[in-house]
Image: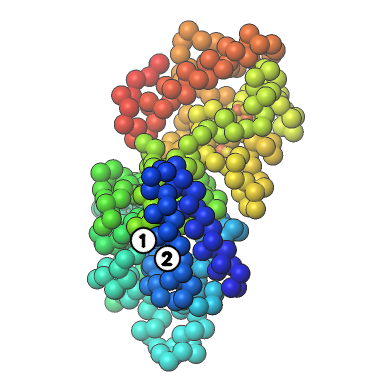
Amino acid sequence: MELNRRKFLTTSLMYAAILAMSKTAEANATVRKASKLVERILQGQEQPIHVIWIQGQTCSGDSVALLNAVEPSIVDVLIGQVKGVPPVELNYHPTLMAQWGVDHLEGPEGPTAQAWDANRILEEAARGAYDPFVLIVEGSVPTEDQAKAAGGFFCTVGEKDGEEYYFEDWLKKLAQRAAAVVAIGTCATYGGIPAGTPNPTGSRGVYDVLGRDWKSALGLPVINVPGCPAAGDWQVKTIAHLLLTVKGLLPPPELDEFNRPTFLYGETVHETCSRGVYFGLGEFSKEYGAPFCMYALGCKGPIVHCPLNKTGYVEGVGMCTEYGSPCIGCTEPDFPDEPLAPFLKELPTFLLPPETPTPVAAPASKGAAVAGAVVGAIAAGSLVYAATKKGSSGEGETSE
Ligand code: SF4
Ligand code: SF4
């Protein structure tokens, strides 16, 4: 256990140092500050940062993925299984909630109703008892007014004395106090599958509920870590960065126009795909299991930003395109709708400029000229897509 704790601290410190290196003037001061922090943590002098993790419309896949984070294992850190004073305390998580288990059965409070009242933690957090805390949101946010109009409700985080604790209300309430808000997974970031057409619950991502211009107590916008689900290591790396930001050791992570950290989502699947060599040669798989580029099988890699080919899913292994599955664009705001759907068909031609050949014709041909034309079409299509994505701040010009 001690080893895990050290790994976490060392990784955080290394992470601070590596990022600081890009800003040479600040590097020494940042690393010195980080070293002191690590020393204080090791001596048990550092106050923990609290984490409140709430779930809306979700399959809990991101929580499962978090449990698979390996280096460091955030689970050891978050649920307090690491000996000593943990620098992070997970105060609320509907799936884990380890602190509401045997410790309370055997602890001084005993199995009292109050000790088991998870709502109490949310109420205390909303009153400031856990400041500073990082609010992590998993799952999309349904529009409760729609449900109320029909006499029901969509999603709650609890209830007390007959009063429903609506997820939408508690997200807004907790966000008011949060030092930082992180949306984990594509449901929480952009609505994801619950928001797919026809979106019967009026689901939205957190930054559409709070507002694109919304800022946390630390002045940060909602940080989005999309993926269906987001790999555990992407979650841990982003959370580790934010913990250091909360401690004043790092500037906030640089974000793209959809609030994704660029250190993770800065490249497309296509740019990091080992099958790219076949794309360049005009060699396209015509059936699953073939080792060539899967563009003709519907791969959306050229217009999708995702770090999977660099990070793997668990312990550096498990990548969609590497392992023979076309990318379906699960990290993108439009997922699971067009133009990412239909998942296993080529990108729709309306995304491509009219003067360029469509990639549909490309698999039947080979050679540099054809490959070059496809590259040109895809590059142009990517630009058009970037300007038309759901919620894009671009002008929205289309080639239709
Ligand atoms: S189109 Fe898909 S399979 Fe082909 S190189 Fe790009 S990302 Fe890889
Ligand atoms: S490669 Fe594509 S389908 Fe696979 S995780 Fe990344 S965005 Fe999702």
Q: Which residue is mark 1?
A: 247
* Number of numbered callouts drawn: 2
Q: Which residue is mark 2?
A: 37
The amino acid type found where label 1 is placed reads Lys
Return the x and y of residue 260 as percentages of the image width and height: 42, 42
Return the x and y of residue 21 as percentages of the image width and height: 46, 45
- Which residue: 44% across, 76% down? 44
Q: Secondary structure at mark 2?
A: helix
Quarter location, residue 157: bottom left
Report the image quarter containing ligand 2: top right
Q: Nearer the viewer, residue 199 or 149?
A: 199
Return the x and y of residue 199 as percentages of the image width and height: 39, 43
The amino acid type found where label 2 is placed reads Leu
Q: Nearer the viewer, residue 298 or 321?
A: 321
Q: Secondary structure at mark 1?
A: loop
Return the x and y of residue 349 as percentages of the image width and height: 50, 18
- Which residue: 46% across, 85% down? 104
